[in-house]
Amino acid sequence: MRADLELIYDWVPEGAHVLDLACGDGELLETLAKNKGVTGYGLEIDHDGINACVARGVSVIEHNLDDGLSSFCDNSYDQVIMTQALQALRRPDKMLDEMLRVAEEGIITFPNFAYWRHRVHLGLRGYMPVSKSLPHAWYDTPNIHLSTFNDFEHLCREKGLMIVDRAVGVGDHQGHWKSRLWPNLFGEIAIFRVRRR
Amino acid sequence: MPDSDTLAFADRPAGSVGVVTPHLARFDTPLALACGKVLPAYELIYETYGTLNADRSNAVLICHALSGHHHAAGYHSEEDRKPGWWDAHIGPGKAIDTNRFFVVSLNNLGGCHGSTGPVSHNPDTGRQWGPEFPMVTVSDWVASQARLADHLGIERWAAAVGGSLGGMQVMQWTMTYPERVANAVVIAATPRLSAQNIAFNEVARQAIRSDPEFFDGWYAEHDTVPKRGLKLARMVGHITYLSEDAMGSKFGRDLRSDDLNFGFDVEFQVESYLRYQGDTFSTAFDANTYLLMTKALDYFDPSATQGGDLAKALAPAQCPFLIVSFTTDWRFPPSRSRELVDALIRAGKAVSYANIDSPHGHDAFLLSEPRYDAIFSAFMNRASRELNLAETSGDEAGKDKASLEETP
C-alpha cells in the first residue's frame, strides 16, 4: 500500500463506518474491510478508479467532491478520510467543514509544498516543483490549492479543530527523525488526524 | 445466397447466444393483484440463455422496459435480422456472460408478446380480456416472476438486472424478496416518476384513448386497431428517449427535399423518422398493454408506504447494488438515479454508482458504450467470483436441461 495509506490504516478503528473521499482504486477500503471489518463508501470521479473499486467489491459512488457532501447526514460516519485530494478542491476549507459535519473525526493527507526539495525547486532554481508527490507540470496540474504543514495547522486553529495526530510520509524514509522534528521542511506528504472540539 | 434482408448466421457478430426458442410456463394458482382483483390463472412466456448450473446458483433475471419483452438476446431463426433488445449486454464474453450465467428473460403479465394480457382470452367470459384485463403493478410483476423462479427451481437470483421500468422491478425484488436476490443492477431508472414523466405518459394514453378506433379498449371486437393513437403515443415516447443532441446529430434540421413546401406533409427528416417509428410500433404493440404498462410506471413509488422515506422502504434489501445513469438521459436523468443511490446510502446498503457519458439519452441503456460495458462487466464478474461460479460446459448444458424439464 502507498506509504500514507499504511499510516492511515492504523488510525482507523475496528468495525468503523467510514467515508473515503477520492478513494482511488479502493485499495484502502478493501484492506480495511477485509482486516478490520470496516464498512462504508468511497467517492471517486476517475473512471478507472471507479471500475477498479467495483471489480474489488468496494462500494463506490461517482461524485465530484466540489459538489459537497449533502448526500451524507450529520454524524453518520465514524471517520472521513481524504487522501491527496485537498489540494485539488475548489474550497478545501469548506470541504473540511463538510467532513467534520458527517463524522467527528477526519484523516487528511496532502503534498507538503514546503518540503525541502520543493523549496529548492522554487527558491534556488526558480521552477515550480515537480516531484513524486507533485508529479504534474504547472500547466496541467489538478492541484489548485497547494499548502504546507504550517498552513493546514493554521486553518485547523482558525476552525477550532483539534489535531489528534500528525505524521509525515517522505518517500521511502517514512517517519524519519528529521521529518518528525521539522515536518514542514522534511515532510513530503502531510498526514493529519483532526477532530471537532 | 441470403437475400439483402437477412444476415447469414455465420456472419453474426461474436458473442451472440445464437438461435433461441421461447418457452411458456402456465400457473394455475390464483394471483392476487395490488388493484384488488385476482387473476385465476396465467401464462408467462420466457427465454433462457446459457446453462443453469448444478446448484442453480447462476441464474440472472432480466426485467424488461415499457415496450420490451422476453426476447432479450440472440435470434429467433437463422433468417432473423435483428437480435433481442439487450443483445449488446447478454452473450458469451459480454457483461452478462452466458458462459457463466444462466439468463432468464420474460414478457411481463399484461404484455402482448405471449404472456397473459389484454390480448389473451378471459376464461370467465370467453372473450378477449381487452380493457377488462386487471391493472398490474411492478409488485404484481415481481410476484409473478418469483413464481417463474419457483417453476425453474431457482431459489435465489445471482443477479436481478433491468433498465428503466426494468430497473424498477429490480428495486421491487430487493424489497419484496431480499433473500432471493444476490445482486441488483438498476440502470437508467428512477424510484418514482416525476410529474413531468407522468404528464408524458398521460399524453401517450390520451392519444390512444381518443383514437376513434379505440372503442373503449374493445377495438379487437370491432376488428380494428387504434393505430393512429398508438403511433402518436410512441412518437411522444420516442422524443423522450433520445437526447436533444442525439436527435440533432442524427437529423439536424435536414429537409427531405431542397424546397420548403409550406404544408403539413413530412418535410424534415426527424418528422419522417418519428412517423416511421410510430407506424412500426402501432402494428407490433397492443394499445391496452401500452395503457397498462404506462400506468404501472406511474404507480411505482416504494416510498409511498413509508411516508415518502425511500431509505426506509429499501431497508429490507440485502444485496449489493450497481446503479448506472447516463448524462444525456432526460427521461430519467442522473439526478433521479442519485435519489436512489442516496436512499441506499442512508439505508446503509452496499451500492456503487456510475454516471456514464453518452450522447444517446435514455436509449443509451440499450446500447454498448466502453465505459458502460466495463463497469457492468466488473460488477457481474465480481458477483460471479463471490458466488463461485465456474464456466458451464456443454456437457453440463445437456444435464441441466434435463433437470430443468423435471421441475414442476
Image: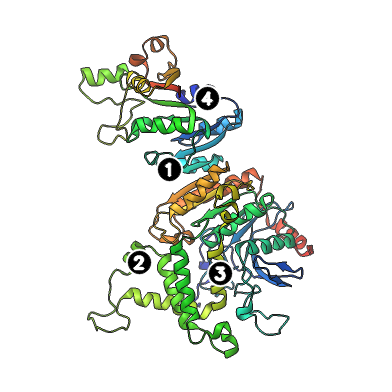
Say which chain tag 4 marks.
Answer: A
Residue A9: mark in rendering: 4
Residue found 55% across the figure and 75% down from its top: B79
How packed is label 1: few (under 14 Cα within 10 Å), some, or many (20 or more)? many
Q: Tag 2, which secondary structure?
A: helix
Report the front residue among A168 and A159: A159
Q: Are marks 2 and 1 on the same chain?
A: no
Q: Are marks 4 and 1 on the same chain?
A: yes
Q: Tag 1, which secondary structure?
A: loop
Q: Where residue B143 appears, x then y in whole percent?
A: 68, 61
Residue A63: mark in rendering: 1
Which quarter shows the C terminus of chain B?
bottom right
Q: Which residue is mark 2?
A: B247
Q: Gap in Å between the C-alphas at discs 4 and 3?
A: 51 Å
Q: Where residue B86 appears, x then y in whole percent?
A: 53, 63
Residue found 43% across the figure and 19% down from its top: A163
Q: Nearer the viewer, mark 4 or mark 3?
A: 3
Q: Where residue B361 appears, x then y in whole percent?
A: 41, 60
Q: Nearer the viewer, mark 4 or mark 1?
A: 1
Q: Where residue A102 appears, x then y in whole percent?
A: 48, 34
- Farthest front residue? B307
Residue B293: mark in rendering: 3
